[in-house]
Image (cartoon, rainbow, N blue to C red):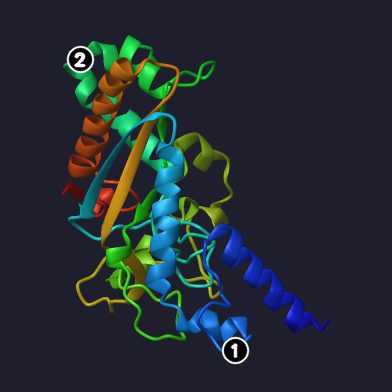
Amino acid sequence: MTKQSLSDEINKYMMKEHLNINPDEGTKTSNVSAEFVEAPYVSLYSKVYERYYKTIVAGQAAHCFSMSTASNLLLGHGEVSALDSSVELHRMYGVPFIPGTAIKGVAAHYARTVIGSAFPSLLPGGADDVVLFGTPDRAGAITFHDALITPDTIVMRSPLSKTVVSSLKLDVLTPHHQAYNSMTIQQVKQPSSDERSKMPASSLRDTTNNGSKQDLPAPRDDDSPIPVHFFAVQGEFKFMVTCSGEQMQVAQHWLQLAQEIVVGALHHSGIGAKRNAGYGRMKLI
């Protein structure tokens, strides 16, 4: 068996066992790669999407709700990337998603700093805070799951570009004062009077290689802009919170509270990078 044929057999097994797709049904070729390209990517992701939520919901109390982006969303913006900036994509299917840890972090911060002033039980260590978010020594009763982008948001532009999605948008940042913004603390910091008294006379002036005084750059209106392009995300995401260790009626109360906090946090505070600049806002649909 050649390396290619072994790879084909493995792909067939994975598609049949984990995606409920029979690669040999209704086709005349044994080339799995060709069959995979011919199969609509949206249909494949739809099966994964449905299976993900059905598997989680089975046997436990859960709340599902959908939210769409009201402004561009920056996910994984600070991660290592071949580009100037990164974007969070599912490692298997190449589509944007919001990690559950990020959702829980934003919700906890919003509950403790915004709602907590009116409801002390949501302050750190409060009764509701412990149940929803837990403590360093105890897990909370609510689990915040990854939010997957809905299949309707994904559009195939070419049969050969399976990971191209319509939810990725090209955004741009144009810093105008690169020299000023790249100054270091050592360049700006002035020595104290005690430090100056101990310094030799030759070191009291900032000098360049030719001995002339070094001028610190100032932000000027005639500085040239430097466009920096990066990927942002737009689309609809399905959120899910589940509750364990509680009776169904009690669990529904905590799930409704968790949903309201998540919706409020994403609507007012946003999620992801550059939230102070208006990015990451979402609305309930």
Q: Position of residue 257 (x, y in %)?
A: 24, 25
- Which mark is in front, 2 or 1? 1
Coordinates of residue 99 in the picture (x, y in percent):
43, 47
Horizontal side of 19 relative to 265 (left or right) equals right
Give the residue type that dot 1 points to. Answer: Thr
SS class, disc 1:
loop
What's the residue at 36%, 69% (across, down)? 231
- Residue at 16 percent across and 16 percent down: it is 118
Give percent across and percent down for residue 43: 39, 69
Q: Quadrant location of residue 156?
A: bottom left
**Real-space Cα distance between discs 2 and 1?**
64 Å
Tell me the crowding category of disc 1: few under 14, some 14 to 19, or many 20 or more residues within 10 angstroms, Cα based.
Answer: few
Query: Is residue 266 visible from the viewing direction of this image?
Result: yes
The residue tagged 2 is 119
Identity of the residue drawn at 35% across and 74% down: 229
Left or right: 134 with respect to 116? right
Q: Nearer the viewer, residue 73 or 100?
A: 100
Q: Which mark is residue 145?
A: none
Tell me, yes or no, if residue 76 can be seen here: no
Q: Which residue is mark 1?
A: 29
Which residue of the protein is positioned furthest toward the bottom in this rendering? 28
